[in-house]
Amino acid sequence: MNIFKKAERLKRVPPYLFKQIDNKKAELVSRGVDVIDLGVGDPDLPTPAHIIDALEMAARDPANHKYPSYSGMNDFKEAVAGWYLKRFGVSLDPETQVISLIGSKEGIAHLPMAFLNPGDMALVPTPAYPVYNIATLFAGGESFFMPLLEKNAFLPDLDSIPADVVRRARILFINYPNNPTAAVADPDFFKKVVRFARDNDIIVCHDAAYTEIAFDGYRPHSFLETDGAVEVGIEFHSFSKTYNMTGWRIGFAVGNPEAVAALGAIKSNIDSGVFRAVQLAAIEAIEGDQTCVREMTEIYKKRRDLMVNGLKAAGFDMDIPKATFYLWVKVPSPYTSADITSILLEKAGIVVTPGSGFGDPGEGYFRISLTQDTERLEEAVNRLKALDFRR
């Protein structure tokens, strides 16, 4: 008898993409290869000093050492509501429409547990951040995959979803600016999403982790700016990308009060909230001087331009992204996503993420993360040019 026989839900879940990348990177490093990791989207820039100072002060206060509220400190929720009003013009009730998260990934992963019963479906984009599908499977639901195709500007074609799927669907996941494609969505798309959700009684879950990383004067929209969006949706934000706080594990969800309350009911039975000192540091992040965000986006813009020019010189093709710190690069013929990933890894010591790892429609692309400094990116460009895929 195998007492450690795994639950069926684990058998349904594919290996986590980024763990596989970490394993491959470790293997190369063990062989003495100088690896340039452009795979995982973990910012290399440090958390701004004023945020660290706020954490240090708050961590020394014994009042913050007790269990926090699972839904978030009132001051934190008020700060989030104030930021939303200032940034997007969206008015939120801090008490009923804002909840703190141990990173937005945690909240996204728990939301399906609040709304999906066995047999229910979630509409999941592909290629996409793997958590949307995995969270659906953990909740006992089924995923219907919506292809994100270049011909549709990497937006899902809602009209093509079969009627029987729409009847079973409870949640629609969207993510703009998008990971991995770096695509953006305009207000007309969000209006269409609201109509679709309202007509079919579907909850919209918008992952908005990259709204603050944008270039060339572009300002990404919040889904909640759309008329009627609060009636059907919930939006997730993270401090990880905007303030280089990936290890701090703090984010928030905002939107429909019933959706926020249901997510809170799950969390109150599973976790004990975010450390109060981290919440106080996050308040400093969104209420403090935003020069750090502007400086960060300028750094990413320079890196974007460096890599786009270098990749094109090496024989690759891609659109120039308006937002995120990703490049969605076309694989040159006759290679596959897996082929090009292996070639770059073995011949150049460069880690990239195969587009197919984010879902079948990602075949023919690979993703580059702009999370290395200029010197390392220049070295990566030189290695790519030495391979020269123009031949």
Image (spheres, grey):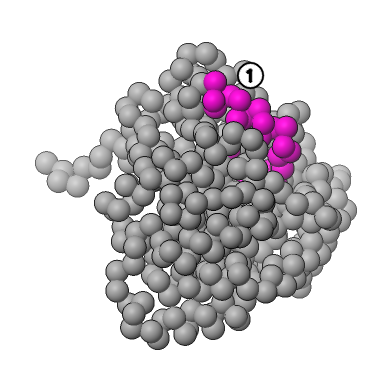
Residue found 85% across the figure and 50% down from its top: 312
Q: Secondary structure at mark 1?
A: helix
* Left or right of 147 on screen, residue 122: left
Q: Amino acid at mark 1?
A: Asp
Quick check: is 245 in the magenta stretch?
A: no
Query: In the figure, 202 relative to 87: above or below?
Result: above
Please state which of residues 157 and 376 is positioned toward the viewer in this rendering: 157
Q: Residue furthest top?
A: 163
Q: Which residues are magenta?
A: 173-199
At horizontal 63% and vertical 55% (from top left) the residue drawn is 85
Circle 1 residues within 10 Å: few <14, some 14–19, many ≥20 = few
In the picture, which quadrant includes the N terminus?
top left
Residue 192 falls inside the magenta stretch: yes
Q: Nearer the viewer, residue 343 or 241?
A: 241
The quadrant holding residue 84 is: bottom right
From what the image shows, is residue 278 above or below residue 69? below
Q: Is residue 171 left or right of residue 339?
A: left
Foreground pick, 130 / 298: 298
For the point 34% across and 59% down, the residue is 70
Residue bearing the label numbered 1: 159
Q: Is residue 129 above or below residue 152?
A: below
